[in-house]
Amino acid sequence: MIDGMFNQSNYVAAKKLLDVTALRQEAIASNLANVETPHYKRVDIAPVFATELRQAITSGDPARLGETQPRLATDFTAISQRKDGNTVDLESELLRMNQNYVEHQLETQLVSSMMLRLRLAITGRPA
Amino acid sequence: MINILTGIDSTSAALNAERIRMDVVSQNIANVNTSRGPDGKPYQRQQVVFESVLKDQVELGATPGSAAHLVRASRVESALRPPRLVHQPGHPDADADGMVAMPNINIHEEMIDLMAASRAYEANLSVVKTARGMAQQTLSIGKR
């Protein structure tokens, strides 16, 4: 019974997106650390993951959703606006970081609320 | 190794590198008029060279194949510009024409460098703050 709760595709997707926000934070930390490194190219979540995730969600199969693996890759779409060939833009990187922070907040609350609902069903009273 | 604060190793490497850069800039400013160093020549402007390093090559716990980078101040090099010549007859280091070779330092350039380093330092501090907030949120999963 409880397995059914933790295998819902919503729950699995929220968990997966939590992993994604943590990984993106790592990418942004790497980018901001190298904001002054010549020839550094910014990294981000590999674009192929978005496609995989979309396909997995459309298929509605939680197991397939759980198998998707986010990873970091060099962002080749970023264009360097500087002489040193570095593709990090300080302002947009900080904006992305704040956006990612709010996304992380959303995912933690989603996962949390699902667990609280389960607890409510078990105990019959709000936690 | 579990890492509660994601990306903190990149950030700490960056804070370290920017601190070295600030140290070098202050050394340059301090020596703006040093016409004789230990080698008898005018002081030469020092500059830090930053280098990005793949995280999975230097860290044991890093995900293999991850594209995340650290940064390090790989070396400090002397600038190759010629010295500034100042007319100062009577100066102990003046040549036959009364010209003294002063360090190849432009104080404005150093001030800009100092500001850039301190801004980059601040940006990395804000990454630490965000990572901390995210860790706190994660730890609150399941609480009301």
Image (tube, coloured by chain):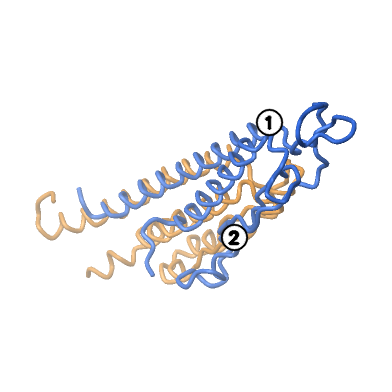
- The one of A99 and A106 positioned closer to us in this rendering: A99
Examine the image and state in which quarter residue B109 appears: top right
Residue B26 vertical placement versus A69 (above, below)? above
In front of the other: B127 or B19: B19
Quarter of the figure with the N terminus of chain B? bottom left
The three-letter code of the residue at mark 1 reads Ile
Q: Position of residue A62 (x, y in %)?
A: 41, 67
Query: What colour do you see for chain A?
Result: orange
* Residue A91: percent from left, percent from top: 58, 37
- The amino acid pointed to by label 2 is Ala
Q: Residue at x 13, y 51 (%)?
A: A127
Instruction: Determine the image quadrant of residue A122.
Output: bottom left
Chain coloured blue here: B
The residues bearing labels 1 and 2 have C-alpha atoms spaced at a distance of 43 Å
Residue B107's disc number: 1
Contact flag, marks 1 and 2 (Cβ < 8 Å): no
Give the label on residue A46, or none: 2
B85 sits to left or right of B19: right
From what the image shows, is residue A17 above or below residue A81? below
**Badge number at residue A83:** none
Residue A14, percent from left and from top: 39, 56
Q: Is residue B69 above or below residue B122?
A: below
Which chain does the residue under circle 2 lie in? Answer: A
Toward the viewer: A56 or B109?
B109
**Could you tell me which secondary element the residue under label 1 belongs to?**
helix
Q: Position of residue B97 (x, y in %)?
A: 90, 31
Q: Which is nearer the eye, B142 or B116? A: B116
Badge 1: chain ID: B
**Which residue is located at x 72 percent, y 46 percent?**
A79
At horizontal 58% and vertical 40% (from top left) the residue drawn is B117
